[in-house]
Image (spheres, coloured by chain):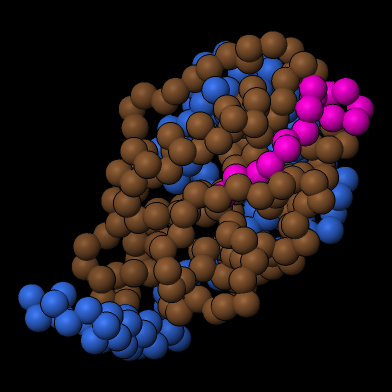
Amino acid sequence: MPTVVIGSARDIVEECGVARFVFSDFPLGNPCGVPYDHDMQRAIVGIALDLLETAVMPRTTVQTPFVWSKDESWKDAYARVDDANREQLRRQGEMRRAAQAKSKPEAGAS
Amino acid sequence: MKTIHRTFVSYIDRTREYYAAQGYDRPYAWARHTDAPFAHLPAPLARCQVGVVTTASPWRDQQSVDGVLRGGKQVYSQPADPPPEKLFTDDLSWDKISTHTRDVPSFLPLPQLAAFAAEGRIGRAPLRFHGVPTDYSQRRTLEQDAPALLSRLREDGADVALLVPL
């Protein structure tokens, strides 16, 4: 079946390898467009329909012309690791592993 | 404008470093295929029924615990008309700092497809939409979930599919 992926995790989708990919350089969560921006959401789906018709080989990526915001600080904020949160992340990981070991005694004992 | 590094986020790099900082020493191995499937349109789009697949789940009044839902997730299908007012996405790794998922058409394009169908750009909008779990098991995705989705899309009479992961 002909398919097109609409997404924002460019490296993950392209490493996987798909038939057609419409990429928007947006934070993960709104691949079809900025929330409540219905014109943009329509345009992005339109680009996906165009790509269904025009692609001639797999791994065809098209990037939409839209920009999430002039300020690109969102790109640094996602899953950021720095001196301000390094210790907190280490503790979170320890707590999660402890909780998992408690709920699965057989895994914790191994 | 000039740049000295890649400007789109590498989620593979970012998540590897994030989980390493949490003390996980075995990085997640993402799917990588040297070949990718490709199918041509069976007919002009104006005569095709379009199907849609999401990674969001049916709405539930339940919080995820550390990003994990109690009870396994399964492939599911729901009517596309009327479109759902909300779907559950808390367990997915979308960018909770910079955006939100309260506007469903921003990740599940049902109104857009209904409009394109009304205008004749596509033959028919989806009768149902389908959901697939985001699973750490690529084997389960390949061997179980993907064939289940394909069979449901074919049941609907879909000719093409939009795959829209969050």
Residue B128: percent from the left, percent from the top? 68, 42
Residue B111: percent from the left, percent from the top? 82, 45
Residue shown at 50%/49% (left/top)?
A: B75
Instruction: Note the chain letter of the blue one.
Output: A
Residue most toward the top?
A: B43
Q: Quarter of the image holding residue B115?
A: top right
Residue shown at 27%/60% (left/top)?
A: B27
Could you say which is closer to the camera, residue A78 or residue B121? B121
- Whether residue B122 appears in magenta in the rendering, the answer is yes
Q: Quarter of the image holding residue A103?
A: bottom left
Look at the magenta stretch and give its main secondary structure: loop
Q: What is the magenta range?
A: B117-131
Residue B84 appears left or right of A15: right
Is residue B148 positioned above or below A82 on the image? above
Is residue B99 positioned above or below B130 on the image? below
Is residue B11 positioned above or below B130 on the image? below
Residue B160 appears left or right of B79: left
Check the picture and name the quadrant holding the C terminus of chain B. bottom right
Asked if one can make out residue B160 in the rendered structure from this viewpoint, the answer is yes
Asked if one can make out residue A15 in the rendered structure from this viewpoint, the answer is no
- Whether residue A94 appears in magenta in the rendering, the answer is no
Shown colour of chain B: brown
Number of marks in the rendered image? 0
